[in-house]
Amino acid sequence: MEKKKIIIIVGPTAVGKTSLSLSLAKAVNGEIISGDSMQIYRNLTIGTAKVTKAEQKGIPHYLIDEVDVTTSYAVSDFQKRARFLIEDITARGKVPIIVGGTGLYIESLIYDVTFGGSGKNDTAFREAQEKIAVEKGNLYLWEQLANVDPTAADRIHFNNRRRIIRALEVYHVTGQPFSSYQSERKEKEPLYEVKIIGLMTEREELYKRIDLRVEQMFEAGLIEEAKWLYQQNLPDAQASRGIGYKELVPYFEEKTDLQEAKEAIQQNSRRYAKRQLTWFRNRLENVEWWDLVAFPENEEELKNEVKKFLIK
């Protein structure tokens, strides 16, 4: 059976993925699926650099503003929904364009990635870990997992408490790492005919763009948005742990000043961008890297390459 063709745009934060996705969608009659783990949440717009309705210019966008901040959204949820959307978009004669910086989301979509374990359970252990998570936070549990199974920890978001506890439980019951029971990819071949566009630029320039973006977020009202999330009193919720929100909590609790909070957001955003680049370079195959920050004139060449891919 002929594979469906999809376009994927990956890269670190603030490198220009949204701008390119809109330009490409217009050029190839595309519709956009967000592959970002934070943009799925309603009411979190500024801190997630979410494309606004005005910026969308009528181009359909999916997996944006779909769940409440009280909800935990797992990789498997994204995988199921995104694959359904690809079928729907393709059936209507449009081109699916997946845009995101959440590496595991992208991998789970392209390949037949499973999310299973050994099947062995220890309810008492699981309940004990839940209590620890409430007392010490999800990050503490994730660090425990990183100590015994760094491979699994690398694949599991530190706010996915259910998944972390399952990984710890498997290790506790079997003595074997959770990652050893998981099938990374049932098949080496991707499920789709995919063109992966990776955006990057020089590190110094990228960091300048990140710092500027954070400044712009504050000007756009990030404090008010983060304050609303803080007032929901969901300290362990996945949404509350996003960069741009968690760093402002000490400020709201008068434990630090605003400048320190802003610098923490900038620093954590730069670190995240570095991790994103490392992940995409190490985990994804056949990524075509472009620097449209330094060489914006190359965008037309990129568009032509995409068009050729779609008609061949």
Image (cartoon, grey):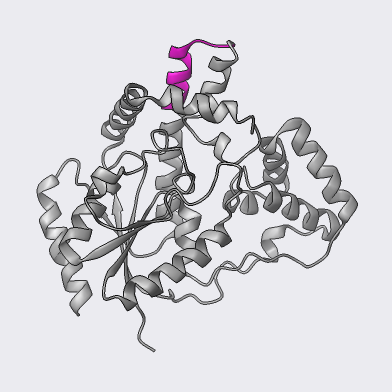
Nearest the eye: 142 or 64: 64
The residue sitting at 31% across, 35% down in the picture is 203
Question: Which quadrant of the figure contains the N terminus?
Answer: bottom left
Lateral position of residue 275 relative to residue 292, left or right:
right
Residue 50 seen in the figure: yes
Residue 72, image x and y in percent? Answer: 61, 48
Magenta-colored segment: predominant secondary structure: helix
Query: Which of the 4 image quadrants contains residue 143?
Result: top right
Residue 241, image x and y in percent? Answer: 57, 35
Residue 290 seen in the figure: no
**Vertical placement of residue 187 versus 206, above or below:** below
**Residue 259 drawn in magenta:** yes
Nearest the eye: 16 or 90: 90
Nearest the eye: 17 or 267: 17
**Vertical placement of residue 135 versus 256, above or below:** below
The residue sitting at 52% across, 27% down in the picture is 228
Residue 279, image x and y in percent? Answer: 45, 50
**Vertical placement of residue 243 versus 188, above or below:** above
Question: Which quadrant of the figure contains the C terminus?
Answer: bottom left
The residue sitting at 9% across, 48% down in the picture is 297
Q: Residue lying farthest bottom?
A: 1
Lateral position of residue 45 relative to residue 290, left or right:
right
**Residue 54 drawn in magenta:** no
Lateral position of residue 176 relative to residue 157, left or right:
right
Residue 176, image x and y in percent? Answer: 77, 59
Lateral position of residue 239 relative to residue 193, left or right:
right
Q: Residue lying farthest right?
A: 124
Label tally: 0
The residue sitting at 26% across, 54% down in the picture is 21
Magenta segment, which residues? 255-266
